[in-house]
Amino acid sequence: MRAALMMKKGLLEVGEIPDPRPRAGEALVEVERAGICGSDLVTLAGGRPKELPRVLGHEFAGTLLDIQGNTGYPFKPGDRVVAEPISGCGTCRSCRNGLYNVCDDRVILGVETDGVFAQYVRVPLENLLKIPDEMSFEEAALVQPVAVAVHAFRRTAFRGGSAATVLGAGPIGALLTMLARASGGTTVVVSEPNPFRRELMEKLGFPVIDPKAEDPVAAALSHLGEGDEGFDVVFDAAGTTNSVQQATEMTRVGGEVMMVATYHGIPDIGIVSGRKREVNYLTTRAHIFDDFRASLNLISSRQLDVRPLITNEIGLDEVPGAFDNLSSGGPMMKVLCQP
């Protein structure tokens, strides 16, 4: 089969490799759509996979072709499916409490095993979910990033009537912004330096701040009503060295800062100010199966309409170029590949 292969740190090439063969308890899936995630860019740039070459990618939707082993699962060839890309060791305390997302020995599709920028992929049967008939493959390919946003959102105390700011309007930040509004947020503001993404969020009806042109803290607070002294929750999906400090200054007394981003340096938290106002700092990592199920339901019911976030659809040969464009801040949001 043809696949986009990480050959070495920073080098992605399209080539031919043998078709994968599912083992007992696994399924073989034909990839219909695969999404490029920011963590894929980090994986390529950082040289994370221990075994190379490696097929990258973990966001996808496809058609089930074959099942090996346990037939107790309600799947059959021809089913349209998505698959959670994380598997835990199954024996550590985190896994036994259902928190395999933080397992030290977790296995991630496209990192420890070959991923989805390919014609076919093998995945554990227990990680599969059927795609509802009313959902397109394009929408289903966004179930995994929605699950990341849902997991982070669920860890906060956000409820109907809350006000939120989201720093960074990449796909995860955009989804958090949409979730906050769909969950009854009274004021939902987003800060984003990329002009393409700012324009997209404005078209979706959100107040948008350009942090390069104005003080994002003062600009965000200006959207609150009289008597409000800060936001209930600020989601940091930007991951810059000063974004947590900005989030701290935006948060009300007793409010929450949810750190969603992958930080590429040591962030300045602004702890002196945060402590004075008893700001609560929260972290998040990936998702668990219930988040995946919830995301599938949110998209299929159109309570969360992800279609406006799909800005580019490409073929497999275009994947290396799309990685370069996304890394350089090109005019893209969610890029889907049809292998």
Image: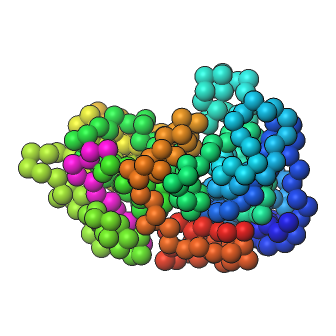
- Assign the C terminus to one quadrant of the image: bottom right
Residue 99, located in which quarter of the rendered image?
top right
x%, y% of residue 316? Answer: 72, 72
- Assign the N terminus to one quadrant of the image: bottom right
The answer to whether residue 165 is seen in the rendering is yes
Q: In the picture shown, does residue 323 fall above or below 229?
A: below
**Relative horizontal placement of residue 333, taking residue 30 as reference (left or right):** left
x%, y% of residue 88? Answer: 70, 34
Residue 31, located in which quarter of the rendered image?
bottom right
Residue 319, located in which quarter of the rendered image?
bottom right
**Relative horizontal placement of residue 21, taking residue 93 as reference (left or right):** right
Q: Which residues are magenta?
A: 183-194
Q: Residue furthest left?
A: 226
What colour scheme has been applied to the protein in the rendered image? rainbow
Tell which of 305 and 14 is nearer to you.
305
Residue at 39% across / 76% down in the picture?
195
**Relative horizontal placement of residue 280, taking residue 338 as reference (left or right):** left
Residue at 62% across / 35% down in the picture?
102
Q: Is residue 76 magenta?
A: no
x%, y% of residue 260? Answer: 47, 48
The answer to whether residue 248 is seen in the rendering is no
x%, y% of residue 98? Answer: 61, 27
Q: Is residue 185 magenta?
A: yes
Residue at 26% across / 47% down in the picture?
185
Q: In the picture shown, does residue 193 fall above or below 227?
A: below
Residue at 16% across / 45% down in the picture?
229
